Amino acid sequence: MPAHFVFSDNKIIGSLVCLLAPSSFQLEPLKHLLLVGNERGLFLHVTNTQDGGAFVKFPQGRVISGGKMLLPVKDKSWMGFLDKVVQLKMNEKGNLIHAVVGEDKFDITTMPTDDFPDFPYTPFTTPGCVLTVDEVKKLLIASKFAATEMKETEENKSTYLKFEKGKAVSVATNHGFIFGHIIVKTKSQNDFDEFQVVLTQSATKLLKTSILELAGDQELWFFKPEGNNSRLVVQTPDGSMMFWLNECISDGLKFINLSNVTNKLSKEFRAGTVRTGEMKSIMKNILTLVQNETKTPFILGPTSQIQYSGEFYKNGVREIPVTIDGEDLRIVVDARYVNDALEELDSSAPSVLKVGGEKMPIIFEQVRGNYAIRIPLMPMAV
């Protein structure tokens, strides 16, 4: 019998609907969009073959006759179905879907699904590394800075993730410099074999997009790629949502030594404590004044200051709330990136500003409970 499905009230698919706006997230166009019905229920299956994919179970879906249906990706008008009672039935030839939506009846042109592979819809029953959605979002902050710095090397950027008991670590890099370094101490203390993966920038964005609509305390299970399978698999504990991310093949990054990363970002650096909230306010005011003239010299030392100029404001000087021992050091950075870095820090808590040399990055660091963030910002050419 041809596939025949009924579903309604499917708010859970909000995350996957986000995946259907690739221009918003700079993702590759989606290749597959399948409805799959089997003995486990009714699932929406979204696949971007380059970066990964996802499936989600319809909580009120009913499978009258099992099978697969391919829904059009280019024409998204059918997305209006998703908050209504919908009945879809494939015709015998497999080229039309008969749709009933409330009082409306119409046909949707489709294609045979024989050539579209199924993801094995078998959820794991024991957890791997357990993180909440909020913890994952914190972990992925590092990738934000790889996305802003050195845009000409976008294809080389990756997000390195390491999962171990009680802790997850992310490092964003362009294979030559570290842009962000995040450590999240996880609430879960379950046992699993620690593992590490490297994701492309687009696969990282796919992960971010997939969890946009999930509650912050929703648990996600992360599983180590097995054998020749280079997919990082993530699922909800009940198996109602699962997505997978194709790994970036990069042996050099695959075995990155985190202690070396920490040492490189700390060795021979001088440091001072920053009043974070006051620093945020100063940077916002400077950005307002300089507008597009964002190349900004920082003078960091015993009496630290920012020098700035804009179209209408020239030779501006503003002292900043940090004291660093030693001689004054002049480092030119982009004020926008400094502002972006500060936005990720807690205004009510102090942070640490580190400097090493004119051609070395300035580094903002802050520890907040179970969460540590380190954001290096490269100097600009003068």
Image (spheres, helix red, strand yellow):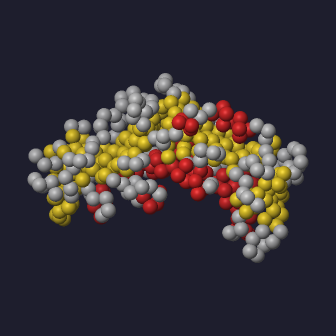
- Residue 302: x percent and y percent? 88, 49
Where's residue 16, x and y in %?
A: 37, 51
Q: Residue shown at 71%/35% (left/top)?
A: 263
Q: Quadrant of residue 164?
A: top right
Q: Nearer the viewer, residue 352 or 330?
A: 330
Q: Nearer the viewer, residue 51 or 276?
A: 51
Nearest to the observer: residue 115 or residue 188: 115
Please tell me which residue is depicted at 67% across the width and 43% down the height of the picture.
374
Q: Residue furthest front?
A: 251
Q: Is residue 42 left or right of residue 183?
A: left
In the rendered structure, the answer to whether residue 309 lies left or right of residue 102 reads: right
**Residue 85 position in % (x across, y down):** 23, 55
The answer to whether any part of residue 334 appears in the image is yes
Instruction: In the rendered view, tell whether residue 135 sits above or below residue 110.
Output: above
- Up the image or down, 234 lies above or below 96; here it is above
Q: In which quadrant is the C terminus drawn? A: bottom right
Residue at screen point 16% across, 59% down: 96
What residue sits 24% from the left and 53% below the top? 70
Q: Quadrant of residue 336?
A: bottom right
Q: Is residue 275 visible?
A: no
Q: Nearer the viewer, residue 255 or 201?
A: 255
Q: Is residue 103 above or below residue 233?
A: below
Note whether 198 is above or below 2 in the view shown: above
The mark total stands at 0
Residue at the bottom extreme, as displayed: 312
Where residue 373 appears, as percent x and y from the top left, is 65, 42
